[in-house]
Every structure is written in structure tokens, then in C-alpha cells.
Image: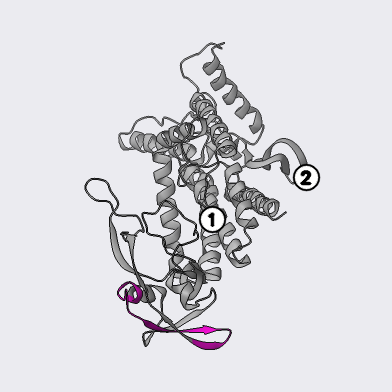
């Protein structure tokens, strides 16, 4: 039940995000006088619709998408241009049909057609959707960082190892005959809050770790708070072998590829995490980091998709930072919601963080300068401004609006590519899902 609830939360969040993306197009279009005939959330058969004024508002069966219909998206063929006979060629017919369909939508409202509006207005209309996703990402990450906080190690013991295993051990579970860990032998319990170690007040988990690592073989008086009372224990850290890690937590390797180890004091305890609210100034850097990582993914998308295919049809593992479909996102959300070992606040923060990342993905993907994406229409408008500016500069005839209908073959190719990419990712998310939780 919790799994289904997590999936539903993400599904509703995605539908709302897409709906508001289209609102980002709708509002400036109406402000600039462009006639909008439809505002739809989803694709496929219409479930519900209502016409208000000149615009039909509705919801379709498949909620993972949306659109608004503006009249005159493509200009008519330039008068005086070279005559072209009707063609049965697939791509030529596609261009002609797109241009003809665009003209049919205009009727008597020629001055309200999209292509007739100034370039700057068209750019604002097309950027309105991605901008709305940026706003949503900021809102979601603000709630996560400021309202809930980020997970950080507290000074409370979250786990106590039952035995001592060296870092190079192939085993993860204790067996009969294994020496008890110093923490377990001393009587430390999950939930104990470290007050002091060897007389030093403990204010952070890293501080306690540093003292323990430097005190192998030395009995340390440890004061903990348990059930509201202070309890004094004596713990002697054991000298054991541990992997050397860098600042990111990755294991450092030697020149020959072997993992570096070091001998340090070991007690066998782990920290309990807690959500620590962050200042509002942490939000924009977080959004910026998400945008940068998403851009990097999009730039390297061919290689990433190849890796996904290798994993889906082979024995390899999925990259946790690789691309994922909405099915995979729903699966991750369901797994988060069904974990019983983390508090409700952490679950809520994780789900909101997923929605923030999804809006960043919608922002970045829609800015790719290819039709039918918003970035493709922006690129066409910018190219029109350059051509007309160049003509004015050299006192030449106005070349008129860019014939964006000629981009229909590219649009067709992009749709096919996106369809294939979606099919691959959905298949991979079913047969070889990303293992987020190890």
C-alpha cells in the first residue's frame, strides 16, 4: 500500500508539473493576444474538457505530457516565392500539410497568429514553460532544504556492530567465534547520544570518529545520554584495518590498482542521521548543481543510452546516475515510501526532492534547440531576428518570418528518437531497475 502511495504521489506531481509547464506557455500567449484554442494535460482520448471563451481546457487519458494549441504556428508560403508542385514525397508532404493545417487554424484572426507576433514575444511564450519548471524546482528544493533539511550525521548512535571484521573480509555477517566489537562489549546501544569521550565534549560525529581512530588500545571513558540520564561506559578501541577514502568517500587505490588500507582505532558504531534545515541561500546552488548534472547527462546521452542497453540486455548493472524513465522514477518513489526504517519526514523530503529533479529535467530537455521542443522554436525565432536584423543593416528586403514548417522532418526524427529512447528506458526500468538503495 505504501509503495502504491509513493507511485501515486509522483504521478500526481508529474501531471501537475506538466500542467503548470503548459500554463507557463498559456499565460504569456494570452497576454500577447495570441489565440489559444486548446489547453490539454496529457495525450490520447479526452477524459474531460470544458470550453471557456475561445479556449478548450481538458484532461486526457495519458497524463505524462501536455500541450497548448496556438493558431498560426507556421507562416504561409512566402508570396512571390518559387512555385512548388504538390509532392507525394513523405517529407515534402509533411511540410505542406503542416503549413496548410496552420493556415486552417487562423481563419479571420490573422493578426492573432503566433508567427505574426514580434520575435521577443514568441521567445517569451516558448520560454514560459521551462521557466515554470525552474520555479517549481526552486519551490520543491526550498521545501526540502529549508522546511525539512538535509540528512547529516548526528551525535546519536544509530547502529552498533556485533563483531569485528577487517575491511578486506569477504564476509559481512558475524559468525560464532568472531570477537565482539568494542562498542557492543562496552554496552553501547542504538539511541545513545554521545556526550563526551575521554573528557572531551562531543559536538559532531566526525569529532568522535577522530578521537576513536587515534586511541587504539587506550581505555576511554565515554559518557552517553540514555533515556534522559547520563551513563558512563569504558570503551577500548581496537586496532583494525580500514580502507582509505578521499573527501568524496571513494576508496583510494594504489598505483597497481589495489585499495589502500590503514590501521585505525575501531569501536563498531554508526551515526544516526538527522534532518538539519538549511538557509534559503542553499536553494539556488542546489538547483544549479541539479541543472549542471542534467546538462551533463543530456550532452552524454548517446553513451548513457548505450550503457543502459548494455545493462538491460546483458549482465551489467545500471548506473545510478544514468537516465531513467517515469516508470523508474515511480518505482523509486514507491520504494522510498515503503521503507519502514526511515521517518515520515525523510520520506516526504525524498519524494519532494524527486519532483524537484524531475522539473529540472523538464527544464533542461525542453531547452534543447530541436523542434518540437520549446528550445527549437526559440532557436527559430532567434534565427529570424538575425536574418531580419541583417537585412535592415544592409538595407535589403525583409526576408519575412522563418518558415518553421520546413523543420517538420527534423521534428518527426526527434519524435521517433524520443519514442525509442523512452521505450528503451521503460524496458530497462522494468527488467533491470536502478538499485538506489544498494
Image quarter where the N terminus lies is bottom right
In the rendered image, residue 408, in percent from the top left (x then y), is placed at 52, 26
For label 2, the SS is strand
Residue 6 among magenta residues = no
Left or right for 51, reference 146? right
Q: Nearer the viewer, residue 69 or 46?
A: 46
Q: Residues within 10 Å of mark 2 (few under 14, many from 20)?
A: few
Look at the image and give the residue range highlighted in magenta: 211-231
Task: Please tell me the numbered disc located at residue 57.
Answer: none
Asked which colour scheme the image uses, the reply is one colour
* Residue 429 vertical placement versus 220 (above, below): above
Query: Residue 355: where, in percent of width, then height?
Result: 57, 54
Q: Say which label, 2 or 1, has the lower sequence index.
A: 2
Q: Secondary structure at mark 1?
A: helix
- Mark 2 lies on residue: 50
* Residue at screen point 74% across, 46% down: 53
Real-space CA distance between mark 2 and mark 1, rounded to the nearest whole angstrom: 30 Å
Q: Which residue is mark 1?
A: 356
Amino acid at each position: 500500500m505504501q509503495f502504491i502511495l509513493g507511485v501515486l504521489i509522483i504521478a500526481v506531481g508529474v501531471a501537475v508539473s506538466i500542467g503548470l509547464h503548459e500554463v507557463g506557455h498559456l499565460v504569456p500567449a494570452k497576454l500577447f493576444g495570441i489565440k489559444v484554442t486548446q489547453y490539454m494535460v496529457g495525450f490520447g482520448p479526452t477524459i474531460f474538457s470544458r470550453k471557456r471563451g475561445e479556449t478548450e481546457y481538458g484532461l486526457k487519458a495519458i497524463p505524462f505530457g501536455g500541450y497548448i494549441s496556438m493558431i498560426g504556428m507556421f507562416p504561409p508560403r512566402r508570396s512571390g516565392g518559387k512555385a512548388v508542385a504538390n509532392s507525394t514525397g513523405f517529407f515534402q508532404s509533411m511540410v505542406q500539410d503542416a503549413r496548410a493545417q496552420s493556415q486552417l487554424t487562423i481563419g479571420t484572426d490573422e493578426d492573432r497568429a503566433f508567427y505574426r507576433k514580434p520575435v521577443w514575444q514568441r521567445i517569451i511564450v516558448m520560454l514560459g514553460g521551462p521557466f515554470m519548471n525552474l520555479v517549481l524546482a526552486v519551490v520543491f528544493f526550498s521545501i526540502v532544504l529549508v522546511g525539512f533539511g538535509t540528512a547529516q550525521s548526528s551525535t546519536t548512535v544509530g547502529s552498533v556492530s556485533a563483531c569485528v571484521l577487517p575491511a578486506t573480509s569477504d564476509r559481512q555477517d558475524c559468525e560464532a567465534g568472531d570477537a565482539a566489537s568494542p562498542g557492543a562489549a562496552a554496552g553501547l546501544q542504538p539511541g545513545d547520544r554521545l556526550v563526551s569521550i575521554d573528557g572531551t565534549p562531543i559536538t559532531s560525529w566526525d569529532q568522535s570518529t577522530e578521537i576513536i581512530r587515534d586511541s587504539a588500545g587506550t581505555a576511554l571513558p565515554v559518557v552517553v545520554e540514555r533515556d534522559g540520564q547520563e551513563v558512563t561506559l569504558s570503551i577500548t578501541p581496537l586496532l583494525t584495518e580500514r580502507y582509505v577514502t578521499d573527501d568524496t568517500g571513494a576508496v583510494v587505490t594504489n598505483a597497481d590498482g589495489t585499495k589502500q588500507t590503514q590501521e585505525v582505532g575501531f569501536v563498531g558504531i554508526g551515526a544516526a542521521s538527522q534532518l538539519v534545515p538549511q538557509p534559503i541561500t542553499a536553494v539556488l546552488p542546489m538547483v544549479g548543481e541539479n541543472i549542471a548534472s542534467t546538462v551533463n547527462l543530456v550532452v552524454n546521452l548517446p553513451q548513457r543510452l548505450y550503457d543502459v542497453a548494455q545493462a538491460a540486455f546483458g549482465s551489467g548493472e545500471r548506473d545510478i546516475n544514468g537516465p531513467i524513465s517515469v516508470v523508474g522514477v515511480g518505482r523509486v518513489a514507491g520504494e522510498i515510501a515503503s521503507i519502514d526504517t526511515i521517518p515520515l519526514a525523510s520520506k516526504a523530503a525524498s519524494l519532494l526532492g524527486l519532483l524537484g529533479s524531475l522539473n529540472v529535467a523538464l527544464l533542461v530537455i525542453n531547452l534543447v534547440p530541436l523542434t518540437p521542443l520549446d528550445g527549437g522554436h526559440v532557436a527559430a525565432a532567434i534565427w529570424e531576428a538575425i536574418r531580419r536584423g541583417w537585412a535592415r543593416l544592409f538595407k535589403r528586403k525583409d526576408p519575412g518570418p522563418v518558415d518553421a514548417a520546413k523543420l517538420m522532418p527534423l521534428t518527426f526524427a526527434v519524435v521517433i528518437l524520443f519514442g525509442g529512447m523512452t521505450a528503451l528506458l521503460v524496458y530497462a526500468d522494468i527488467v533491470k531497475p536502478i538499485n538506489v538503495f544498494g
